[in-house]
Amino acid sequence: MAGGWAKDGAVNEQIETSIGEELARMRMRARPGGESRTHCIACEEPIPEARRAALPGVALCLECQQERDQAFRARPGINRRGSKDSQLK
């Protein structure tokens, strides 16, 4: 039951959308499987055999991966409710 001008099932749609977005983000961050590359896709330097054996599907050398990890910033959640209480938290 939705209140106000929201249609019936609006809360469930918001929850499903939030879950779907989080699952998509998690899939993007999942490590790929399969054969590892022999050279980094960013700088073309050789990837050490130990790294390729430890991480199947690796595509970046250690230095490029560290740069990418440092550049990543977690995004805050999206406020879908729009109430003043949820915006103050």
Image (cartoon, rainbow, N blue to C red):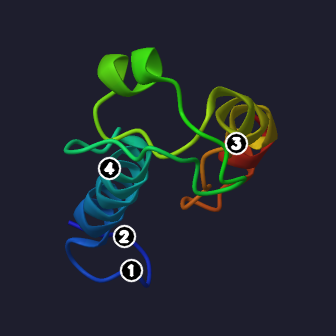
| Along the viewing direction, whichever of 30 and 81 lies nearer the viewer | 30
Numbered label attached to residue 85 = 3
**If the image is split into quadrants, where does the N terminus sit?**
bottom left
Q: CA distance from mark 1 to mark 4?
A: 31 Å
The residue beneath circle 2 is 3
For the residue marked with disc 3, what is the amino acid? Asp
Q: Work out whether residue 45 or residue 78 is closer to the camera in this orientation and state it.
A: 45
Q: Quadrant of the C terminus?
A: top right
Circle 1: is it few (<14), some (14-19), or many (20+) Cα within 10 Å? few
Count neighbours of disc 2 (C-alpha within 10 A) and say few if under 14, some if 14 to 19, many if 20 or more: few
Question: Is 8 left or right of 48, judged from the image as shown?
Answer: left
Q: Quadrant of residue 15?
A: bottom left
Labelled disc at residue 6: 1
Measure the C-alpha gap from mark 2 to mark 4: 34 Å
Which residue lies under the disc numbered 4?
27
Q: Contact, CB < 8 Å: mark 1 with mark 2? A: yes
Distance from Cα at disc 1 to Cα at disc 2: 6 Å
Q: Is residue 37 above or below residue 15?
A: above
Identify the element where label 3 is drawn.
helix
